[in-house]
Image (tube, rainbow, N blue to C red):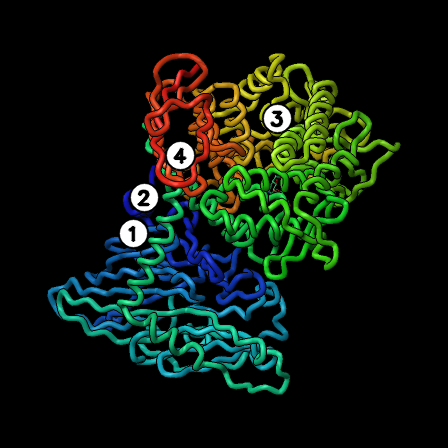
Amino acid sequence: MKFGHFDDIRREYVIEHPDTPLPWINYLGCEDFFGLISNTGGGYCFYRDARLRRLTRYRYNNVPGDCGGRYLYLRDDDTGAFWSPTWQPTRTELEAYSCRHGMGYSIIASQYSAIEASVRYFVPLGQTLEVWQAVITNRRSSPAQLSLFSAIEFCLWDALDDASNFQRNFNTGEVEVEGSVIYHKTEYRERRDHFAYFACSEALTGFDTQREAFLGAYRGWDRPRAVEEGKSGESIAHGWAPIGSHQVNLRLQPGESRTVTFLLGYQENPPEQKFDPVGSQTLNKQSVHPIIARYLQPDEVEKAFDGLQHYWNQLLDAFQVNTPDEHTNRMVNIWNAYQCMVTFNLSRSASYFESGIGRGMGFRDSNQDLLGFVHMIPAKARQRILDLAATQLPTGGAYHQYQPLTKRGNNDVGGDFNDDPLWLVLAVSAYLKETGEWGVLDERVPYDNQPGSEQPLYEHLQRSLRYTIDRLGPHGLPLIGRADWNDCLNLNCFSDTPGQSFQTTTNREGKVAESVFIGGLFALAANEMAALSSRYGRRADADFYRLSAQKMSATVMEHGWDGEWFLRAYDALGERVGSKDCPEGQIFIEPQGICVLAGLGATDGRAEKALASVRERLATQHGIVLLQPAFTRYYLNLGEISSYPPGTKENASVFCHTNPWIMAAEASLGHGDQAYDYYMRINPSAREAISAVHRSEPYVYAQTIAGKDAPSFGEAKNSWLTGTAAWNFVAITQWILGIRPTLDGLQIAPAIPAAWQGFEARRLYRGVSYVIRIERRGRGNRVRLEVNGAGVEGNVIPIPAVGVREVKVTAFLL
Ligand code: BGC
Ligand code: IFM
């Protein structure tokens, strides 16, 4: 069953039923002001930091679900009937409903009692406000007398405190109302720093700012007293729960439309004002008057909307393909790239699964996310790299997370995730392959943000690799530390309290756990570093890293091979993890993907064998599960991974982030059909037809799909903020379609399905527009390139200065 359809021309997903299995959301904003918006108007917004500058309140575990958002109510003043044009919160059965989620905007339209309403929500570029533009049309044959009410609930800024510190917070709330603008000024006495405003384009019939006055005691958002009675309470909040609600009367003739605009914004005062202890307590309202006046004008709203569309078109146009498959096209051209940008903006902070108060920016996550957006925003990717490197520790290790507002590393979840530093090497390598901007390696960056500790980025990368080399275990494999990519594989834990075991890193008998996965990752990163070093004029370093990669590869082949696949690890007692000898968890996906990608087993058939084992043991119709057999009980020596029920999360779900490693590995061996088959199994658009099973949004990837051991096999969870976005983009564009940036130019090495005769792509690369046409001519394992009509040796297009390059590729593929 489907709940909507894709509109690829408008780059939108159109939801046709409000009661989707889960709220299907979108993101507003792409700079400093962000909003999450569901298909029924739910969600919240914040300025930069979802925890510390939360404008509106949202209750994750609310009943009914997804209640709290950007609400409008229409009331027929002749009959007293009222409804919500976004369906929530009244959930009145509508005559028509659609929600168009687009690139940075959502439009929710509906009809009830022959009154049509369409509300467009977006954040203008360069502004810290969201626009809700409502167009109300009377489709009746008689005049309609309507009241339109708005309603939002303010959050008292720090979302964690807001949800817990009631003894204080029930006293602090303050507002001001001036004309059609409601100001939220809680905290202003103390900080004189920031405030929020909620403006309306019309003269008001009434307003409310105190929640209980608007709702009525013991009522919910579905039946506010003010709406039921058609009369606002003119309430001014003193403490308790400040809200913003406008009431506007509309008399519409048959066929007549009216546009009513609301602005919900954030304003920050200049530093002089906030740090002056005896400064004025007067709200700096005049600072936002011009902004409000501007965006209440429909032509300004239109201009801003056009600007937003132009911004997204430009980003997405950096890479467009036309393949024989519509699911591939729309994911590559639109949604996968869009999701990569959302992970750039939000990291893992705020989604319908991440509360916005829990997590900062992950070191590992942000480095990997970069692989998916570097081609769209190279300059911002560069800054991200420098920010990340500045949190690196002098040992080469990393804080696992840092705070977006301060850009400082934090120890909230502890450290010692021993894979962390290696991802920085892969991120920088991806940046250099994309841009060729070698100057970045000379940038002086501090360690742990400590002034005076600055060293060139190149040295940071060296320390990243050194970190692994300095931490090898009994088999010569890298020590895993607290965990590697798999946060829940906690092998150094022998606490006797199962619930706490993953927090300890003690080991017994002098043995410490080792990770085969980090071995593979190190080989991959060290080879990348060797390539960077030699082009950077450091020949001796290049030799060292090449040798280090070879040594590590040999160690993995000797101690990390289990006969039919790569082992996962050795636990702290030196026992094999991910081996045929284990009672459960005999094979894990991660080392199969990363080791093959690092070139391990390429010449002796072991890479082929490892991938064949994945096919036989891990692949399912809903994707490749993380391990088999799933853990059916808790294992003290494995930690959190075995705390999950079988088939969920790290315990044998289809952990989507890892699937593209296998796709890329298959493609690297020339197995186009197999790589593409895996790609399609988790492609959200291809799964749209089974939305009742998949349940999450069909336009973005989710972190997991329940594995075959789970009762809900096939159900996706934790959509949007996941490394799955970046890695799938890499797998399809660089490995299957084979358009791969390298240090020497764009390489064309497709591994496409046998049924495809070819495809076309447009790729902006180092300022040059490439128009690439690939045609399959026969079997083999090579391509012939013609660039602007002239034949070129090999499969890498030499880098020209500027211009347009027509590239004809004749492919002879397996
Ligand atoms: C979760 C893991 C997740 C990790 C992220 C853990 O608490 O259970 O699934 O990967 O947090 O850091
Ligand atoms: O690798 C991690 C990631 O950093 C956070 N989410 C889960 C992944 C696997 O544990």
CA neighbours of label 4 inside 10 A, class few (<14), some (14 to 19), many (20+): many
Sequence order check, earlier mark of 1 and 3: 1
Cα distance between the residues tagged 4 and 3: 31 Å
At a point 53% along the width and 55% down the height, the residue shown is: 61
Asked if the residues shown at circle 2 and circle 1 are in contact, with their CB atoms under 8 angstroms apart, the answer is yes
Q: Which mark is residue 598?
A: 3
CA neighbours of label 2 inside 10 A, class few (<14), some (14 to 19), many (20+): many
Sequence order check, earlier mark of 4 and 3: 3
Per the image, the residue denoted by label 4 is 687
Q: Which mark is residue 4?
A: 2
Does the numbered disc 2 mark a residue whose Cβ is under 8 Å from ligand 2?
A: no
At a point 72% along the width and 34% down the height, the residue shown is: 638
x and y percentages locating residue 475 in the rendered image: 79, 25
x and y percentages locating residue 529 in the rendered image: 64, 34
Q: Amino acid at mark 3?
A: Ala
Per the image, the residue denoted by label 1 is 98
Q: Amino acid at mark 4?
A: Arg
- At numbered mark 4, what does the secondary structure look like: helix, strand or loop? loop
- Asked whether the viewer can see residue 44, the reply is yes
At a point 52% along the width and 19% down the height, the residue shown is: 669
